[in-house]
Image (cartoon, rainbow, N blue to C red):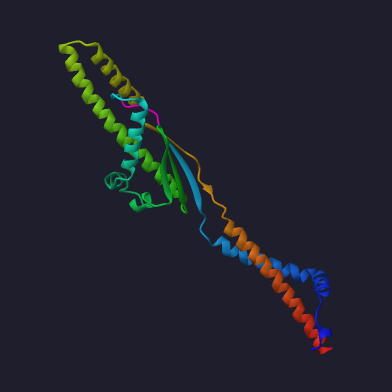
Amino acid sequence: MSLNSQITLTELIKMAWNNKKVMIIFLLISIFMGTMLTGTKDAEYHSTIEVTVDLEPPFPGNINIKSKNILREFINKLYSEDNFRNWGENTVEILFENIKSPDLEIRTVKNNKTIANLSHKNINIHNEIVDYLEFTNTTLTNKYTSRALYEKKIIEDSISKSPDGILMRDLLQRERFINSVNSGMKLFKIKDEPPNELHSTSIYITLLLYLIMGLLLGVIYLITIEQFKRTRS
């Protein structure tokens, strides 16, 4: 084949323009293939769950220190296998290993607030994690309520024998706590946002690569046809 039969860039652009329908067909096929490939990938979701101290236990101590301590106890309880087993007898979506997974990040941002960031591919996992947090919240609330009831009885016995202003204050604190729990309050308020689907940049990169591949295949097809025509002539 002589040099005269080689296709110049100008001719290539003109060929692509004159054969727009062919180029569009190659582009559409490549986009379809790229969409099919990315569509087979599991969707990924991100959830943010906020846990704040809503009810202080009625026991001595600085408020900030108490909040920090019960938050720490809350987190430790979450990572307790016994606590998970007590909750998860009927669960089918998550295992105890999921709680310790790097996909679930639990961190304290303030003395009275904890943030749980969760990445997952099954939207039901979000609901079960929230349910597990609520279960742990109820468990700790019941624990502190039982302690308040026990101490209330002891204080009442002491007051009946020897009335005392400090004991009356302690009694009122425990009664307020117990009444708050009876009205429906718990130690923590759990606020969860609906899971957001992550749009990974890899999806767009894949589609772009398939688009470029379709463009190149279309160009190669046109060059092959043109070279064949020139060879025959």
Residue 184 seen by the camera: no
Farthest residue toward the left?
Answer: 161
Percent position of residue 161, x then y: 15, 12
Residue 121 lies within the magenta run: no
Left or right: 33 in relation to 126: right
224 left or right of 205? right
Q: Is residue 220 visible?
A: yes
In the drawing, does residue 157 fall left or right of residue 35?
Answer: left
Assign the magenta stretch its main secondary structure.
Answer: loop
Marker count (numbered): 0
Q: Which residue is drawn at 39% across and 42% down?
A: 131
- As rendered, which of 138 and 6 lies closer to the eye? 6
Location of residue 31 with respect to 110 vertically, above or below:
below
Q: Is 155 above or below relative to 123?
A: above
Does the segment drawn in magenta span residue 56?
Answer: yes
Q: In the picture, which quadrant includes the C terminus?
A: bottom right
Q: Quadrant of residue 2?
A: bottom right
Asked whether, in this view, residue 118 is left or right of residue 211, the answer is left
Where 155 falls versus 192 (above or below)?
Answer: above
What percent of the width, then of the height, locates residue 155? 20, 18
What residue sits 50% from the left and 42% below the top? Answer: 194
Q: Residue at x 30, y 35 (%)?
A: 140
* 50 in relation to 56, above or below: below
Choose between 1 and 150: the one closer to the eye.
1
Boundaries of the magenta span: 53-57
Image quadrant in which the N terminus is located: bottom right
Q: Which residue is drawn at 35% across and 24% down?
A: 180
Which picture quadrant has residue 228? Answer: bottom right
